[in-house]
């Protein structure tokens, strides 16, 4: 009876994952589909101002700086980039100042929706070095909500990652889960800054990041047979093809960016050192969905201009 109960519970969780992922797949292709707006909508910006991928990267790095300074959730930045990109592609940006205002408002809106800690509007304005006042941000938020049609919950790569990692086998070690999660998050944060990855869907970016994370985990922690079963489960359950053309291209571009600019080995060593500070017995007893900060482990991830 006990084994049948566990099987039933696993099946329910599995079905939940499938339903959630399928809904997010539909959303990313419709409501939250992003386009290459820098090559189309903003190609002819007035006053000789250039809005390009480098400018966008600087803006998103500023967002990460703000959330780190305020001890907020870094995932709020990923959501904010969707608000920024969608608003820019729908006519709210005509110059660099507009882009900056939309970015600040995007971050403020994302924090309000996704973080338990609030940031006062006047504080956000001060972090923007006085370029805008509170009335500017309030007015822009109204405009953005209108062009977004109040769709403010985009499926980010981390959203997909959370669901896909629920398909890991129960016997997967807590350390392996943690390493996959942290490396995938790190890669997702780096890719959020780099404009060329806008052409890939969030699901493909999540799968590509997971692919790279698995490649960097010692087989003693995550045996090949476990990783193969996991990837097969993802493909068969959700339709996200681990070996598909888009995932493969995204992974190749990510590897190139990471190899040229980011030392992932340092990240892996930091995570490994953190995990070894925790009792081995405790790690084995942790539930599959435990958050590592609950047992004293904190994310070693960092995204800045020096790492991109």
Image: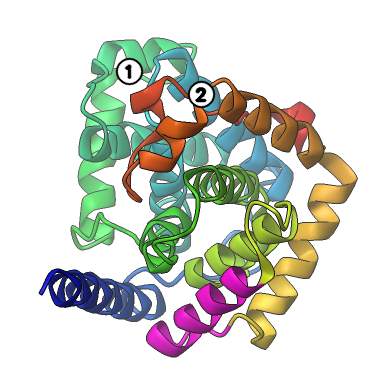
* Left or right of 28 in this view: 42: right
Q: Residues within 10 Å of mark 2 (few under 14, many from 20)?
A: few
Mark drawn on residue 133: 1
- Magenta stretch, residue numbers: 225-241
Residue 102 visible in image:
no
Residue 54 visible in image:
yes
Q: Which residue is mark 2?
A: 278
* Left or right of 301 in this view: 265: right
Q: Position of residue 143 (x, y in %)?
A: 25, 48
Q: Which residue is at a point 22% across and 21% down the rendered structure image?
A: 118
Q: Quadrant of the N terminus?
A: bottom left
| Main secondary structure type of the part rendered in magenta | helix
Q: Secondary structure at mark 2?
A: loop
| Cα distance between the residues tagged 1 and 2 | 47 Å
* Rendered view: 254 above or below 235: above
Q: How did the renderer colour the structure? A: rainbow
Examine the image and state in which quarter residue 28 appears: bottom left
* Left or right of 178 in this view: 211: right
Q: Secondary structure at mark 1?
A: loop
């Amino acid at each position: 009876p006990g084994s049948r109960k566990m099987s039933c519970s696993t099946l329910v969780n599995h079905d939940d994952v499938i339903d959630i992922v399928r809904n997010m797949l539909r959303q990313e292709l419709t409501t939250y589909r992003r386009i290459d707006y820098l090559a189309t909508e903003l190609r002819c910006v007035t006053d000789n101002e250039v809005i390009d991928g480098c400018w966008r990267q600087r803006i998103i790095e500023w967002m990460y700086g703000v959330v780190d300074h305020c001890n907020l959730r870094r995932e709020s930045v990923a959501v904010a980039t969707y608000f920024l990109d969608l608003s820019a592609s729908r006519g709210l940006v005509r110059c660099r100042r507009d882009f900056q205002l939309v970015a600040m408002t995007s971050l403020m809106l994302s924090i309000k929706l996704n973080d338990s800690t609030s940031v006062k509007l006047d504080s956000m304005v001060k972090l923007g070095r006085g370029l805008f006042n509170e009335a500017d941000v309030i007015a822009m938020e109204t405009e953005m909500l209108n062009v977004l049609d109040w769709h403010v919950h985009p499926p980010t790569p981390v959203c997909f990652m959370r669901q896909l990692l629920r398909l890991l086998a129960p016997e997967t070690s807590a350390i392996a889960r943690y390493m996959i999660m942290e490396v995938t998050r790190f890669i997702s944060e780096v890719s959020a800054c780099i404009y060329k990855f806008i052409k890939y869907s969030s699901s493909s970016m999540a799968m590509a990041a997971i692919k790279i994370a698995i490649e960097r985990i010692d087989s003693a922690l995550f045996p090949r047979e476990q990783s193969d079963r996991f990837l097969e489960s993802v493909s068969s359950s959700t339709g996200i093809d681990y070996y598909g053309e888009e995932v493969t291209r995204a992974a190749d571009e990510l590897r190139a960016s990471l190899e040229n600019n980011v030392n992932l080995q340092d990240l892996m060593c930091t995570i490994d050192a953190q995990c070894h500070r925790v009792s081995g017995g405790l790690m084995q007893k942790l539930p599959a969905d435990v958050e590592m900060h609950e047992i004293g482990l904190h994310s070693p991830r960092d995204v800045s201009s020096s790492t991109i």
